[in-house]
């Protein structure tokens, strides 16, 4: 099906892909501590990797990954802490985790998304799928009505609502789900040996099922195949509705 990354398309290739399926995919990344074993760009790498496979199946064009995102934040003694800096230390003072550099104000993030949506409408897209870093996905989904009424854009995220089977797309933080997805998409970047082999020592800055015992490339692949299939069906219906006269 050819190239799917926006930045790599010539105008003619862009036009052809847009005419076939006016879908834009926006990977909501971060540069964020994802355990000792995963790369700092895990959120964008997972969502972009998933979107590349989805675009090959459903059509559409994959945007570059964002690395600024939003999160819960606090200041203490003049230092800034956010997300896993706070969440990882429920009983102690927060700590700045190594490599995290992504936080922007929720209002600023919404404005950024709004500008992006405006540009996507201008370029001719009708459907936008965004996914990645949890709080950024929440911010995006909170504006669904606005994207529809202001820009006429139909939007999707990739969570199903019930993720209890552990086979969703980015449903934990650097735990079994995210680790399995990075293993499946970019196994060359995963360093499981960096984690303490002692099961009684909880890995730092991880939220969810233990990746040392529950993560595998097979599990990641299964989640990707299942969700590509599911999202491709949703997008096919969305495109069909666009084509109906009078809508
Ligand atoms: Zn993540």
Image (cartoon, rainbow, N blue to C red):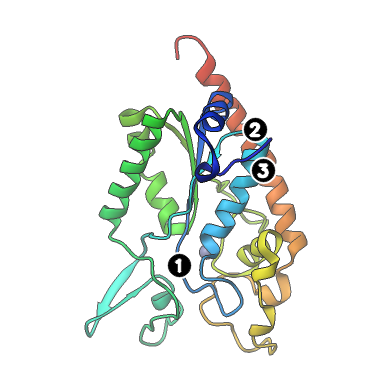
The alpha-carbon separation of the residues under discs 1 and 3 comes to 25 Å
Numbered disc 2: secondary structure: helix
Residue farthest toward the top in the current orientation of the protein? 245
Which badge, 2 or 3, comes first in the chain's sequence? Answer: 3
The alpha-carbon separation of the residues under discs 1 and 2 comes to 31 Å
Which badge, 1 or 3, comes first in the chain's sequence? Answer: 1
What number is the disc on residue 238? none
Residue in view at x 39 percent, y 38 percent: 144
Q: Which class describes the residues within 10 Å of circle 3: few (<14), some (14-19), or many (20+)? A: many
Q: Quadrant of the C terminus?
A: top left
What number is the disc on residue 233? 2
Reply above or below: 229 against 96: above
What number is the disc on residue 228? 3
Q: Along the line of sight, which residue is nearer the eye, 217 or 73?
A: 217
Numbered disc 1: secondary structure: loop
Tell me whether circle 1 and circle 3 mark residues in contact (CB < 8 Å).
no
What number is the disc on residue 31? 1
């Amino acid at each position: 099906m050819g190239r799917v990354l926006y930045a790599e398309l010539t105008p003619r290739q862009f036009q052809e892909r847009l005419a076939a399926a006016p879908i834009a995919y926006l990977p909501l990344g971060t540069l964020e501590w994802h355990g000792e074993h995963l790369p700092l760009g895990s959120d964008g790498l997972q969502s972009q990797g998933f979107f590349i496979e989805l675009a090959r199946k459903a059509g559409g064009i994959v945007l570059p990954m964002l690395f600024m995102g939003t999160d819960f934040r606090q200041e203490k003694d003049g230092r800034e802490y956010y997300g896993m800096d706070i969440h990882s230390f429920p009983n102690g003072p927060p700590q700045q985790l190594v490599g995290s550099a992504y936080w922007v104000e929720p209002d600023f993030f919404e404005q950024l998304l709004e500008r992006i949506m405006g540009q996507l409408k201008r370029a001719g897209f009708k459907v936008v799928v965004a996914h990645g870093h949890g709080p950024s996905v929440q911010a995006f989904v909170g504006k669904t009505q606005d994207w529809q009424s202001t820009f006429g854009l139909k939007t999707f995220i990739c969570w199903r609502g019930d993720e209890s089977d552990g086979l969703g797309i980015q449903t934990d933080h650097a735990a079994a789900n995210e680790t399995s997805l990075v293993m499946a998409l970019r196994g060359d970047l995963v360093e499981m040996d960096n984690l303490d082999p002692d099961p009684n020592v909880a890995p730092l800055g991880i939220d969810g099922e233990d990746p040392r015992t529950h993560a595998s490339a097979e599990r990641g692949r299964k989640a990707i195949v299942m969700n590509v299939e599911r999202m491709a069906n949703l997008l096919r219906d969305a495109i069909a509705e666009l084509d109906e006269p009078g809508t």
